Amino acid sequence: MAFRLSSAVLLAALVAVPAYAAPTTTKVDIAAFDPDKDGTIDLKEAQTAASAAFDKLDPDKDGTLDAKELQGRLTEADLKKLDPDNDGTLDKKEYLAAVEMYFKAADPDNDGTIDARELTGPAGQALVQLMR
Ligand SMILES: [Ca+2]
Ligand SMILES: [Ca+2]
Ligand SMILES: [Ca+2]
């Protein structure tokens, strides 16, 4: 009797798990990019974080990132698009322009900030890649 009851409870619990609980996107801790702790990322915060990420990714300190140093943060197609001088590397100005591009794409409501929900979208995820 006790066994039957607990299996019924277990079954109910399994059925109750909603389908969207499956991990589809990486959970991003917005606080890591939100020094003023207002719960959103503004462009200045994004560029500050991205600037620090750039320095971290550029150990030879030649001021540019090549595809290898970018470690898959940008697709080859994006790298081409974001590299107007076509030298195969991104300097910091080009990198920050990329951040601005993804920032705008990740901010469909155009309020100038990225909230936690916007950060989980595809453009938000791409932005995170450039900020860490
Ligand atoms: Ca903030
Ligand atoms: Ca370049
Ligand atoms: Ca927004």
Image (cartoon, rainbow, N blue to C red):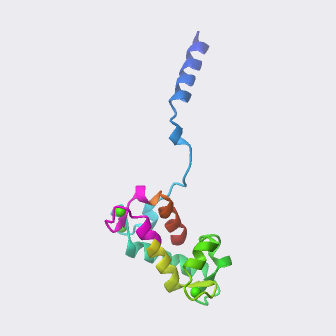
Q: Which residue is drawn at 54% across and 28% down?
A: 15
Q: Which residue is drawn at 51% across and 60% down?
A: 122
Position of 33 relative to 48 (above/below): above
Q: What stretch is highlighted in magenta?
A: 102-118
80 left or right of 28 in image: right
Q: Position of residue 89 (x, y in %)?
A: 61, 84
User: Magenta stretch: residue 103 in it?
Assistant: yes
Extreme residue toward the right, this view: 68
Q: Quadrant of the C terminus?
A: bottom right
Q: Which residue is drawn at 52% across and 66% down?
A: 126
73 left or right of 121 in image: right
In terms of depth relative to the viewer, which is nearer, 43 or 48? 43
In terms of depth relative to the viewer, which is nearer, 54 or 126? 126
The answer to which quarter of the image holds residue 57 is bottom right
Q: In which quarter of the image is the N terminus?
A: top right
Q: Where is residue 25 in the image (x, y as percent from the top left)?
A: 54, 53
- The mark total stands at 0
Q: Position of residue 6 (x, y in %)?
A: 57, 19
The answer to which quarter of the image holds residue 76 is bottom right
Position of 10 relative to 51 (above/below): above
Extreme residue toward the top, this view: 1
User: Magenta stretch: residue 51 in it?
Assistant: no
Q: Position of residue 26 (x, y in %)?
A: 55, 55
In terms of depth relative to the viewer, which is nearer, 132 or 94? 94
74 left or right of 106 in image: right
Ligand 3 image-quadrant field: bottom left
